[in-house]
Amino acid sequence: MKDKEAYSNAVKCLPNPGLGLGLRSKHFNYIIEHEPAVDWFEVISENFMDSGGRPRHVLRQVAEKYPVVMHGVSLSIGSTDPLNLEYLSKLKMLAAEVKPLWISDHLCWTGVNSLNTHDLLPVVLNEESLKHICSRINQVQDFLERPVVFENPSTYLTFKQSTIAEWDFLRYMTEETGCGLLLDVNNVYVSGFNNDFDPVHYINQLPHDSIVQMHIAGHQHCGDYIIDTHDRKVVNDVWKLFTLAWQLTGSVATLLEWDSNIPEFEEYHAELLKAKQFMSSIGSGEYITEHGEQFEAAVSNPVDFLVNNVLIN
Amino acid sequence: MGGDDFSLVELQNWMQGMLVKYVPVTNSRGGEAVTVEDLVNSSKRLNAIRHLDIYRHSYIARLRACMQNQFSALTYALGADLFEAFADQFLDTYPSESYTLNTLGEKFATFLEETRPDKELNEKETWPDFMIELAGFEYALSVIFDEPAEEHRPIATEETPDGNLRLAPVFHLFKHQYPVCKYYLDFSQQQEPELPFPEESYCVVTRRNYKLGLFTIRAAQYYFLLRMQQGKSVELAKQDLISGFKFKADDVDAIWPQWKKNFITSGFFDAV
Ligand SMILES: [Fe+2]
């Protein structure tokens, strides 16, 4: 087993590639043809690890021209099932091919008894689960021979058995394993609204030197709760949290997530570049105010973009 | 109060049961049922049940959307409501066991066969047969789209000698009781096809430059290409046509140049 210090030091040496976008099949042709000036791309590992067709072919070309980060949704670090070694092997093989700057996943579990709900389910935050999760992070990092970066997911409930605040839980994870953190400021906002905590306090309490990346995204306000839909522009309050986190972390790689109602590439890129206006608190950014209450059906973590759209001639 | 001493394993089993099963499982501890309120906090705006319901609703809605994506022609053929009912039942029966969503619909055609509404009746309806074939075909397309293949050999031209013709690296033959391929093509060209009548049909699916090519073919062409897929040369495949289909040798020789031209234009052949 490698020393957690080694992982922790490796995390601290990770570069800041700048402002990145998610690589989505809708934009494959545009990216290959135009080679847009995006700093880096984040790819969903599961979309490419089994691909022998177009997705893998496109990824190879993208990885030749841009820095790439691998972001996963199926590691299920919090699950009480054994780790899926087949999955981890494929992840490692993909990483050997793509050479990502880092590999990330979520602080969550996706299922037990070999089932996969394909959701990022909330973990119980207590001593027992912290021990369980840290020992699994150690195993994963040793298997992949690199530190792994964990994201705070959007949560829609908290458990009675939880005794540790999420920000503390994340900090203990970094201290115990040397892992890195991916701070999703939109998820902090969403979880904070849903579970009555102050997002500013949450961000202030995190171990900022372990944060290697941020996510920003749009969400849907449903009145008495918020769903993390990744289907629209980033709202005012989330940009404010971004400004705060940008300053506390001393600037880290930042990515705009957009997974449903995905706009044309230029529009997606333009929304990302707004981040530049929010990097200082004096901010010249144009704020969007939340559209009050919207009661259309909303789905958290939309995943249908993860299914290949077959292209026929 | 039954949640305090729930272990991590029990808690995850409980929550997953609440999401995955249409009728949630009830847990009990020492005779007392465990309620949502025992395990989940309520907040300023929502009670515990509404908190959990966000996950419950999203679970099925999210996977339903994936199924519709993977089976878009079938969704059109069945109509959105009926498709949704089948998809929900399917997800209840065969919840995902994979880290990838690409295989979510793998057992869907089997499921439709197992649950066809006329299963018990002697007199079978015909439309379920079509739906089952269409489901199987759509799933197969998604697999072929992403299958690994070495696409390096040059594509054959009309000048390529017969002896040097080889099938394309991604090449699949299908035989259906319904004109499934034609229906799928019409659907993808937004022609709003009607439910077809039974009619034996044959098609080829290839992949060139990472795009699929779908071609309807005739029965004799299907058997000819099937022989080639089994490793036979053009010459031997032609002879099988003569012995198996009672074709006259002269007729086969007469029609071959036209077939060859069409097959090559359609990208069925590489040259060695
Ligand atoms: Fe995120």
Image (cartoon, coloured by chain):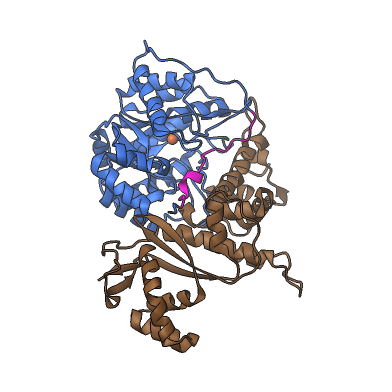
Chain colours: A blue, B brown
Q: Height in image: A209 above or below B159? A: above
Is residue A84 found left or right of A156 in the rendered image? left
Question: Quick one: B231 or B8, which is closer to the camera?
Answer: B231
What is the magenta segment's predominant secondary structure?
A: loop
At x 66%, y 51%, the residue is: B79
Q: How many marks?
A: 0
Q: Is residue A300 part of the magenta span, yes or no?
A: yes
Q: Height in image: B245 above or below B125? A: below
Q: Is residue B162 visible?
A: yes
Q: Is residue B241 part of the magenta span, yes or no?
A: no
Q: Quadrant of the N terminus of chain B?
A: top right
Q: Is residue B107 visible?
A: no
At x 53%, y 47%, the residue is: B8
Q: Position of residue B237 (x, y in %)?
A: 39, 82
Stretch in magenta: A295-310
Residue A286 position by quadrant: top left
Question: Quick one: B93 or A287, which is closer to the camera?
Answer: A287
